Amino acid sequence: MYNEMTTFRVSRRDVLSYGSAGLLAAAGVGLFGAAAKADKKTTMDALAKVTSGRTAKSGRITLELPHIAENGNTVPLTVEVDSPMTDADHVKTVHIFAEENPLPEVASFHFSPANGIAKASTRMRLAKTQNVIAVAEMSDGSIFQASTEVKVTIGGCGG
């Protein structure tokens, strides 16, 4: 019995081209998957989850954002809540939301009386012109809310 092996030669170029095609196919699946949809309903649902049916009051929150963001990829944000930061009266958490971002929950900052001041700064990405909302949860269960519109001119997540 004669057993002849057939040799199949694969060049390095073939391996690279087949590997590249496979990577592109895998990347394409990720690109055309279900995209996150930016809408106000998603933001309102996220706000309702934080407030748990409590009515938000205005005041006590200072939200510093540029009125016009020339680059939506890095928008500076500073939030401060007026509070004595004592055991009896302090800020527990500040939540930041962006109405038109694919994921509206931008950040949450947790505080205690040991912080001495309820202030935080960060940078965030904004997809397009929209309202940025800050919600502060106080130690007594009360909720405060403030919002500011930021006009994004170029370079946001999608516009």
Image (cartoon, rainbow, N blue to C red):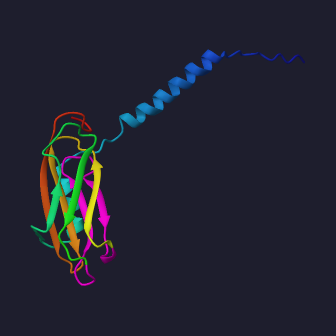
- Chain part drawn in magenta: 86-114
Is residue 44 in view?
no
Asked if residue 111 is among those painted magenta in the image, a careful observer would answer: yes
Q: Position of residue 11 (x, y in %)?
A: 66, 15
Camera-nearest residue between 110 and 28 = 110
Residue at (61, 17) in percent of width and height: 14
User: Would you say 46 lies left or right of 30 here?
Assistant: left
Q: How many marks?
A: 0
Left or right of residue 34, residue 78 in this image:
left
Residue at image coords 23%, 56%: 78
Between 66 and 151, which is closer to the camera in this rendering?
66
Residue drawn where x is 21% and y is 34% of the image: 159
Q: Residue at x 24, y 84 (%)?
A: 88
Compare residues 81 and 137 and report the one nearer the observer: 81
Report the front residue among 37 and 127: 127
Residue 52 magenta-highlighted: no
Q: Is residue 95 visible?
A: yes
Q: Quadrant of residue 1?
A: top right
